[in-house]
Amino acid sequence: MSKKKDDPGTRRTAAARNGSGTGSGGVVSRRRLIGGAGAAGAAGLVLGAAGGAGGYAASRGEAPTALTTVGSTEAMFHGKHQAGITTPLQARGHLVAFDLTPGSGRTEAAALMRRWSAVSERLMAGEPAESGRGHDTGIALDAGPSSLTVTFGFGRTFFTRTGLTDRRPAALDPLPAFSSDHLDAGRSDGDLWVQIGADDALVAFHALRALQKEAGPTARVRWQMNGFNRTPGTTERPMTARNLMGQVDGTNNPKPAENDFQERIFVPSGGSSAYAWMEGGSYAVVRRIRMLLDDWEELTVTRQEQVIGRRKADGAPLSGGSEDTAMDLDKAGPDGKLLIPGNAHARISSPEKNGGAAMLRRPFSYHDGISDDGTPDAGLLFVCWQADPFKGFIPVQRKLDRGDALSPFIRHEASGLFAVPGGAASGEYVGQRLLEA
């Protein structure tokens, strides 16, 4: 397999990577037979229904493509950053946390990360998952890479169990309690965290199953959550996605082209040597946010727009303009009242009201069936990325906690904070600079 040094956020077609669509040595990958037609279509990045500062929709900028080409796009495993952070949001996702088993320590964790990295590199390149722990299951036979990404993170407890507490950064201190929390401890936190995303459900499940098998006796699943989003090619042009409340969601995520994007989202170099392993990495806050859809849907569209601060039809701010128009937080109507209400979600979470605090929101929607009381167990698997959660998620969520008009319609049911190290260089595995320092 050829080594790749591209930024893992980059996506390219299999044919573009290999010219004729063949792998090294002229062998055609079973998952590259789809062909090399254009890049994937237009799936937008969904904004967290709560706890988000402003940013833009990280939708694919290319023209939409035929659905048959969706599987041909490939994300890079090796790079400065791990894939799955700046990669455009995929249609299917799995979030899963593992705990190390009794007797498993630093040595076993290093071996696990080495196995996980090797399998992930193969799967993201469209190759079988064959390893020392068994043959490929065949779940994703005939599918292309489908923009598969696998991202790894470490929870606070990981450092205690591996004897690395001296290398645990202060940014992993526990998140504070919020009044909207109704947290299930069994579905929160964890020693290890894995985010899987792909534009095909079978490709995503294939990766999930392969990683679960590779965990072997070293780690057991603590919790798993499954999500989805708009599939590429379902709109005639690139558009911001909608969440399960029907809102255009993700308009103002930080843009990679912005001068301060890197310093807001990724840990810079030049810090303490004890934490050098986090250079190029980021911190992921994960929240399972249940949407009380029955209550929400009883509101008129006008009232829903006042709660959010944006028009439901096109995502434009209530102060006027189009979706990309900056909010005029001081603009009032003929009656003298602010067009964007004082407790509107978009106002309270905006960078202007939070000292410029921002985070890259990259969540999935979820639906886990109908509860005993007949209400849908559905909402958002909120994932946000930042260089420091104490400067990103936490100050914004504290402000939302004190008066967000959206709060009566959501419930935070699970939570986690994970240190996601920088990407692995060619020949490295993810986390090697921590585990073998």
Image: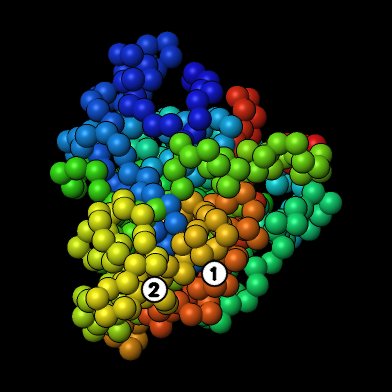
Up/down of 196 relative to 342, above or below: above
Determine which residue is flagged by label 1.
397
Measuring from the top left, give residue 152's x and y in whole percent. Answer: 58, 47
Q: Earlier in the sequence, mark 2 or mark 1?
A: 2
Q: Residues within 10 Å of mark 1 (few under 14, many from 20)?
A: many
Does any portion of residue 306 appear in the rendered image? yes
Residue sitting at x 25%, y 48%: 239
Between 97 and 408, the residue placed more toward the observer is 408
Quadrant including the C terminus: top right
Mark 2 vs 1: CB contact within 8 A: no
The residue identified by callout 2 is 344
Name the spot of residue 279 as percent of width and height, x first: 68, 39
Residue located at (31% from left, 78% from top): 336
Is 12 left, or right, of 418 in this rendering? left
Quadrant of residue 26 within the rendered picture: top left
- Residue 254's tag is none
